[in-house]
Structure formats: structure tokens, C-alpha cells
Amino acid sequence: MIGLYHFLILSGVLFSLGVLGVLLRRNALVVLMAVELMLNAANLAVVAFVRYPMFGDGGIVNAQDYAAMTNGMTLVFLVMTVAAAEVGVGLAIVINLYRQKKSVNIEEANALKG
Amino acid sequence: MQIQVPEISLWQVLPELIVLATAVGVLASDLFVKSVQRVNVTLTATLGLLIAFFTARSLEASATPIFAGMVVRDSLSILLDQIFLAGAMLVTWIGHEYARRNPRQFPEFTALVLFATIGMMVIAMSADLIPLFVGIELLSLPLFVLAGSDKDRLASGEASLKYFLLGAFSTGFLVYGIAFIFGVTRTTNLTVIGQSLAAHAEATPLLVLGFALLLVGLGFKISLAPFHMWAPDVYQGAPTPATAWIATGSKIAGFVALMRVFTLPDVSFAALSDYWTPGIWWLALITMIIGNAGALMQSDLKRMLAYSSIAHGGYLAMAFTSGTRIGAEATLFYMAAYLLMTVGAFGVAIAASRSGQECEKIADLSGLARQRPWLAFAMSIFMLSLAGMPGTAGFVGKLWLFGAAVQAQYYSLALIGVLTTLLSFYYYLRVIVYMYVHEPDDRLLFNRYSFSNGLALTVCAVGLVGLGVFPNLLWSTIRLCTGAV
């Protein structure tokens, strides 16, 4: 049967893919997507924790479960909203880079060092 | 299913609402007024911030969380609101001068500073991981834009790209950490988490992982080594007033987030301190060494201040490691002092421009004392305070920081702190030597600095010396916040 740990492993894989994407890919847009992957991995984990609680019988059975569910879902919705806002700002910044460099390769953003 | 609407007490968050209204007003003025006068924008922002400041002062502190347990209006949040509002005012004033040379960034600059301030105030009053996270984002997003607001300069765009990518990356860690903490404790409320951990302080691997991820996420935000790589580039590339707010407001807010999560009495993960204390201990140690060593080699003024800011983050983290009340008090005092001296230093960097040329290298300050003696004098105060010269707030603050570490028996950490402080005198005094000893390297005169910038620098300098001589002015308020009578 599919349970909490299946989801946690999937979320861990997604998160690791996101981290690797940020560290290894050089295209700013792909890096942006990798960051989104990290946030969605966290969301998946929260939703899985709500559906399959670590303690107790599982599922939404009493008031405490209900409170935990609303709490977790609020977190998920806010993370989604923030991710959208982040993409908005991020794309503007990438476009600004493209305007100056005619490229979205982050290797070319190398004027500052020391 | 019955749905309960939580009690909404808007007047408790009135300062935030006033700042929000001011920011929206400033932003909208550009739409409705044909040519916006810089003076009017700055005056509006100042007025809004002043009203918010005195509203915050008049609020009554209460330890009971409001908005369904999301935020708490305790005396700590009220004090921090005042610090952030005062800081925003100083940054607006030094930005006013910068805008004279870069009119295209106005009035968005002022509005973005105000928006970021709201994020800081939300962090200061959060009693739950959700507003903490939202506050960090409310703070970060305007700062990403501010860093890139000088659209035509290559370095500014690059700074904002780096800041954004690293900031978003760290948000991923933060949220993943919150997810695990939520999973184990089934709540995001800090008080409830603290209680349930105190009841059965069992460090399951998931919980420790959650905390580690949270610490990494916040470590990026406050540029603790080894998560500091972005700071020098961003500080150097961003427009100077934006750098001032990134260096002060965002760093202080990050430490406040750490305090809210890790140390405050009752609302704490103190039960797990065996796990997180060694982590922050090492971070503080590495940060102090890397920050000071990096600053030694810089010829760029803003880059030097960036490394110095990293080093100061290390000192704050050191007191934070102690986990004691005196540590929290010392951290709060040093935050206020750090705000004044860093905003002041960046303010001088803005004022010491020559015609058509911003002050970038430390060598650009050569001969400042001869042409603008008051500017050089103010900069000397800021540098000496950053270094920790007796008679300034920087000295008193550092004394308490080291005292907290010694009291908690972190002798080696305090020793490294003192040694790196001695080292730091070299690069701070170098700035003073350039201003007073070196001849100006060309015949270009320094620009006249505006009234607003002069006012900001005066406030910073007088505040630093005032707090250095009479630290009790602030110390007594801080002790009220942390519960000591």
C-alpha cells in the first residue's frame, strides 16, 4: 500500500533534482524551474503529512486532525502564491539580464568578483 | 462543519497598515501626478514612517497571539518595529540624495524600501512559521527588485540576478524545513511546537533534518559563512541605498527570524538546543573568520563593507549561540547599533560622489577630510564604531556580545571574536587613513551632499556616540522586552 514514506521519498527526489538543477544548469530559466521544483517538493511533503499523519490512525478523524489539515493547507496555498510571485520577479530580472547580454546564461553574469 | 472566523484586530497591526498605505500612495503618485517631485515623495514617506513609528510606540504589548495565533504583539515586536521604521527612514533619506543623480529610479525606490519594511515588521511579530515565511518573502522580493533597479548598469542587473537566484534557492530550503517540522509536530504554531517538543524532546531524524534545512535557509538570508557567497557581489553591484537596506534591514530581520524560532522563552525549540547549538557555533566561528579575512583584501568600499557585514553577522551569531537572555539582549542592542553604523557608512559612500562618478573604491575617499571635513568626521565615527572603539555603540554592543559568549562558557568562540575584531581595526582604519592622510588623486571636487543625507548621517553619528556613552537609553527598553525587570 502506498503510504507516507513513498511520498516523502518522491518529494526528496524532487527536492534533490531541484538542488542539482540550481547548482549544475547554466540557463537562468532552467534554474528558475529548478527552484520551483524545490518549492513543490516541499508542498508535496506537507500534503502527504496531512493525508498520512506520522502519529495516530491516519486520515481526518478528529478536531485535532482537522486543525492540522487547515494549518497544512494554508501553508501549501501560501507557498504556491509565493512561488508565483517569485517567478514574476524572477522573469523580470532574467529579461533585464537578456536585455543587457542578449543571453540568459548565468555564466556570463561575471562582472562582479574579487 | 462550522467555520469559525478568528478575531480580527486590525488596530494591533496599524503600523504595518500605515506603512502599506504610504508605500501604495507613493507608488500611485507616479500615475496621477505629472512630474513627481522628489522632495514630496521623500516627505510623504518620512511622514508615513513617523506616524507608523509613534503608532507602534503607543501600542500596548500583549503576549496573547492575535489573528488566530499567527502573530503576536509583544514588546519585542514593538521595539523591533521601531528599529525597522527608523532604519527605513534613514535609508529613504540617503536614497533621496542618490535619486538626484538617478531620477529614473524614483519614486519606485522609496515604495520598494517601504514594502520591504513591511516584510521585516511581519517577521518581527510572527508567532507561527507561516507568517515567518511570508514575512521573509515580503522582505526579499522588493529587495531583489531594488538590487536591480539601476537598469542600465550591468553590475546592478547581475547583482539582482545573483541575489534572486540565491534567495529563491534558500527559500526552497526554508520551506522544505518547515514542511518537515510541520510533519513531525502537526502544527506550524511556534508556541505549540515548543510545548510539544518540551513534552517529549525526542529528536527524530525528520525533525533534525527540518531544523537543519531551516537553519540553512535562514543562513543564506543572513549570509552566514559558508552561505555568504552572494553577499559581496550583491552589495557591490546593487545601487548603494539599496545595498544599505539589504545589509541592515534584511540581515536584522533574518536574525529576528532566528530568534523567534530558536531562542525566545516559551516559544522555543530550546528542547532541542543540544542539536542546533553546535551547528550555529560552527557557523559563527567560520563566519567571523571568513568575514574579517575577506575584508582585509578589498579595495572596493562596498565589497569591504559587505565582508564587514558578514563578520558582524558572525558576532551576532556568536551571542546567539549562547541561548541565554543576556545573549538575546546583546543581540538586540547590537542590531540597533549595527543599523546606525552601516547605514551611516553607506550614506557617506553616497555623499562622497564626484561629478558623474560614484564612490566605489576606498581610494575614491582620498582627501575627503580636506574638502568635506564633516563627512570625513562622520565616516570616522562609523568606522571606529564598526571596529569597536570605546565611546561608540559598537564597543558597548561588542562588549555585551563577547560577554554573553563568555558567560555561556564559549571561551574559544569569544577568543576568536576578540582576535578577529583586532584584525578588523586594520581595514576600518585604512578608510580613515585614506580620508585624512592621502591627497585627492585628481582635481575633481566632491559633490555637495543634500540636506536629507546630512540629516541621516547626523542622526546615525549622534545615535552611535549617544548609545556609546549612555547605553542605558536603549538597554532598559531591551530588558523590558526580554522580560527582565
Image (spheres, grey):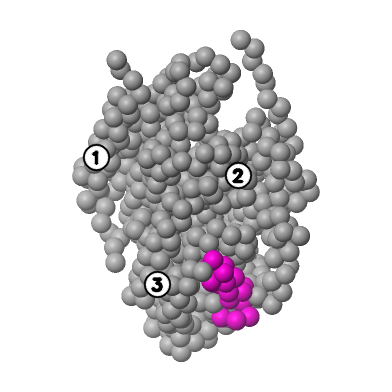
- Residue B457: image quadrant is bottom right
Q: Amino acid at mark 3?
A: Asn
Label 1: which secondary element? helix
Of badges 3 and 2, nearer the viewer stands 2
Q: What residue range appears in magenta?
A: B389-408
Judging from the image, mark 2 belongs to the subunit labelled B
| Residue B46 placement (x, y as % from top left) | 67, 53
Which residue is under mark 2? B267
| Residue B87 placement (x, y as % from top left) | 61, 58
Q: Residues within 10 Å of mark 3 (few under 14, many from 20)?
A: many
CA gap, disc 3 to disc 1? 32 Å
Which residue is under mark 1? A21
Of badges 1 and 2, nearer the viewer stands 2
Front-most of residues B271 and A30:
B271
CA gap, disc 1 to disc 2? 36 Å
Which circle marks residue B292 in the picture?
3
Q: Which residue is pictured at 56% across the width and 16% down the height? A: A62
